[in-house]
Amino acid sequence: MRFSRLLVPTTKETPNDATLASHIYLIRGGFIQSVGGSGLYNFLPLGKKVLDKVRAVVKDELDKAGCQEVSLSFVTPASLWEESGRYEKYGKELLRFKDRKNNEFVLGPTHEEMMVNLVRQSVKSYKQLPLNLYQINLKFRDEIRPRFGLMRGREFLMKDGYSFHVNEEDMKREFDLMEETYRKIFIRLGLEFRVVEADSGAIGGSGSKEFMVLADSGEDTIVVCDNCDYGANIEAAVRKEKPCDAKAPEADFAKSHTPDTTTIEDLATFFHVDPYYLVKTVAKRALYDEGRSEIVLFALRGSDELQEVKACNAVDANDLVDVTEEELSEVGLEAGYMGPTTAPEGVRVVFDNNLKDASSMICGANEKDYHLVGNSFVGLDADYHDLAAVQEGDLCVHCGSPLRYTKGIEAGHIFQLGTQYSEPLGCNFLDENGKAQPMVMGTYGIGVSRLLAAIIEQNHDDKGCIWTKESAPFDLQILVSNIKDEEQVALGEKLYEAMKAKGADVLLDDRKDRFGAKMKDYELLGVPHAVVIGKKLADGLVEFVSRDGMIKEEISSEKVLNFLMERF
C-alpha cells in the first residue's frame, strides 16, 4: 500500500475523553473513529486491517482445534432469553426493543440461547456429539458508562464458542483443550498474560477461567502467586487459612457495655484485641428476579473485607446494594451494633468460612451501645461461604507463598456450563439406550476488538503504538525522505515492489510531506520495522529501524534488499 493512497487521518490532538494509551493512539493514529462519543466506533482501513489480522489468528487456532465457525443473528428473539431465565436477570445492559409487529427482541450481548436453539434443532443423537461451534461476530452491551475506547465500548467484536457433550467428563476435556488453544492464541499475538480462576457472573456455570493481559491500566485486579502458577480474579481468589499470632481475648459469654463503638477500629481499641477476634457484620439488600429483595447479614472476621461478588453468589442474588439505617431499623437491626447471632427472625445471615468453629469472638448484640463477648461458633449450624476478599500478603492455597495484586485486562473467558442452558431450553439428545438427556455444555469467549486495545496497552511508548508481529497493520514501512530525490524514490520503489512480490505486507511512504512528519507518523502507527531512505544514501547507506526501542542500524544500500529478503 502507498501511504499517499491510504485513508489514515492522523492527528496530534488527544481526544478529550481519552485517558488510556490505547484509546489515545488508536484515535490519533486513525485506526478507529468515535461515533458521537457514545461507546461506538468505526474501524478505518488501518484499524480494520489490524482487526482482521487478530481475527485470523483466533480463527486459525480454533479451526486447528476442531471447532466449526457459524454466524448467528445479531438480533435475538426475547423469547429465548425468557426460556433460559436470563431476560430479567441480565439487567439493563441487555438492550430490549420491539419490531413493528410488537414482537420483543434483544441485541445479543452473548449468544448462549441462540446457539442452543440452533443445536437443539439440528442435533438429536449421541452419535453427533461432541460438537464445538463458534462465531466471530458483533455484540452489544448497553454499558451505563462506556469508556476507555475499545476497552469498554457498547458494540464490539467478540469470538464466542459453545461446545456440546454427552457427559461432564467430555465437556471438561474440551474445556482443557480450549484453555490450551487460547494460550496458543495469546502467545501468537505476542501478549504477556495470566490464566486465572474467575467468577462466572451472568453467564453462569460451575467453573470458569479468565485470560488476563497484564497491564497497569487494566480494570481488573488479579491475585497472583510468583512461586507457582496460581492466579485468580479478586472476585474468585481464595487463600490459605491463616492463624493469628495475637492472643485471643479471655471472657465468659456476656453482654458488654460499649458506648459509641460502631466500627471495627473503635472496638479493637476498646477491648485491646486484634480485629481477627471481632465479627464484622455487613448488611446488604439482595436483589432477585421479579423485583424481590431481602436484607442479608454477612458475617466475617474484623480483619477481613467483604468481597461483594462472593457475597452475591452466596445468596444467589442478581445484585447487592447498600442499606440505609432506616431500612435496618424497620426489620429490627441496630446499625453499628449488628451481630450474626442476634439477628431478628426472618433476617438471613451468612457466615464466612473462616468463622467456622471460631471461639473467643466479640460481636454486636443488636442493641445500641452493647456487644457480646465470649462468643463461640463451635458446632454452630449456619450458612457458611467464602466471603472474604483476598489481601496482598495472604498465603497461596497451593504452595503457601505470599500472594500479590496486579492489574489485568480481561481478554478471554471460558466457562464450564453443564446443563444450565440445555435443560431450560430443552436441548436434549438420545443416548445409547434411546433415553433423552440434556447436553452438557461449555462456552468460550474472546474479546477480539478489545484485544487491539490490550496489545497497545502492553506495547507502546510516549510516541505511539508498537504492534506485535502477528497484529501489525504492515510488516514493513519504507520511508522515502525526500520525494524530489530521484535516487531515493528509485530505491524505495525497488524495495517496495520486490517485497510485495515476496508476499510481505509493505507500506511505502511516498508522500510529499517533510521527513520529520513522516517519522512522527511512523512512530505513532507502530509498524514493527522500517527502512529509512534519506541523505545517507549519497554515501551508500540506509537505516533499518525497529519500532520497539527505535533501534537503528545502518545498512549498505546495495545489500539492503538481500537483508530484507532474509529478514522477512
Image: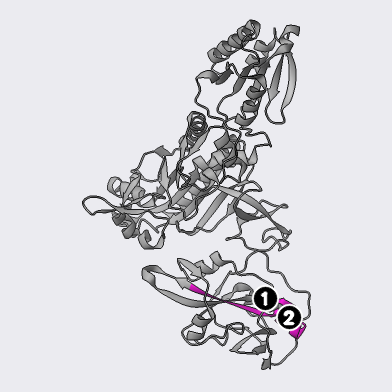
Whether residue 305 is visible, yes or no, is yes
Task: Give SS at disc 2.
Answer: helix
Residue 556 x/y as whole percent:
73, 10
Q: CA distance from mark 2 to mark 1?
A: 9 Å
- Magenta-tinted stretch: 267-285
Instruction: Assess whether residue 379 is covered by the magenta stretch.
Output: no
- Quickly name the residue at label 2: 268
Identity of the residue furthest to the left in this view: 101
Residue at 60%, 73% in the rendered image: 353
Residue at 37%, 46% in the rendered image: 129
- Quickly name the residue at label 1: 302
Q: Nearer the viewer, residue 380 or 235?
A: 235
Instruction: Assess whether residue 284 is covered by the magenta stretch.
Output: yes
Residue 39 x/y as whole percent:
47, 46
Q: Is residue 109 left or right of residue 46?
A: left
Q: Which residue type carries mark 2?
A: Ala
Residue 273 x/y as whole percent:
76, 81
Task: Give SS at disc 1.
Answer: loop
Q: Is residue 516 left or right of residue 106?
A: right
Disc 2 vs disc 1: Cβ atoms closer than 8 Å? yes
Q: Is residue 356 left or right of residue 77?
A: right
Residue 217 x/y as whole percent:
63, 48
Going from N to C along the chain, the mark reached first, 2 or 1, is 2
